[in-house]
Amino acid sequence: MGWHIERFERLAGKRKRSWATVGEVGSFSVTSLLITDDGTVWAGMTHGLVRITDDGCRFFTSKEDGLANDCVQALALDGEVLWVGTANGLSRFTISENQKGTSQ
């Protein structure tokens, strides 16, 4: 069973609706949410991190993207740095202007 996140914005008196389908994620739980000034949604989950933009979504995991652990427990933004608190420690993502995350 898939799930999706919907985001509504008010633009000039009209509602803009955007959503992203994250796919077949089973019983994953969202543990934290962070929304940047440009409307990008970062969702920390029990099995990874998801970045949702108007162009779609991208899933980050420890195996593929260098998260300290797939169980994300907290998110914090400091300028262009996204701090991701996981069950095994802290991961640092640098966010470029096009919102692609790179872990360090």
Image (cartoon, rainbow, N blue to C red):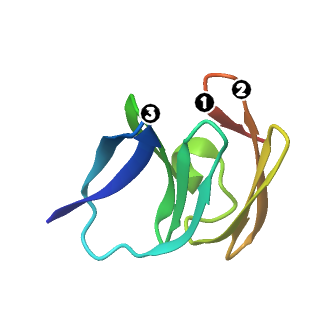
Task: Point out the frontmost of discs 1 and 3.
Answer: 3
Q: Residue at x 43, y 45 (%)?
A: 9
Residue most extreme to the top: 98
Q: Amino acid at mark 3?
A: Ala
Whole-percent x, y for residue 86 in the image? 68, 70
Q: Secondary structure at mark 1?
A: loop
* Residue situated in front as seen by the camera: 41 or 25: 41
Relative to 96, residue 78 above or below: below
Residue 24 occupies which quadrant of the picture?
A: bottom left
Label 1 crowd (10 A; few <14 / some 14-19 / many >=20)? few
* Residue situated in front as seen by the camera: 64 or 40: 40
C-alpha span from label 1 to label 3: 28 Å
Q: Residue at x 14, y 66 (%)?
A: 1
Please say if the residues under marks 1 and 3 sit with CB atoms less than 8 Å apart: no
Q: What residue sits right under mark 1 in the picture?
A: 100
C-alpha span from label 2 to label 3: 28 Å
C-alpha span from label 1 to label 2: 6 Å
Q: Which mark is residue 96?
A: 2
Residue 103 occupies which quadrant of the picture?
A: top right
Q: Secondary structure at mark 3?
A: loop
Q: Residue at x 65, y 45 (%)?
A: 36
| Label 2 or label 3, whichever comes before in sequence order | 3
Q: What residue sits right under mark 3 in the picture?
A: 12
Q: Amino acid at mark 1?
A: Lys
Query: In the visual, does 45 lie left or right of 86?
Result: left
Relative to 38, residue 41 above or below: below
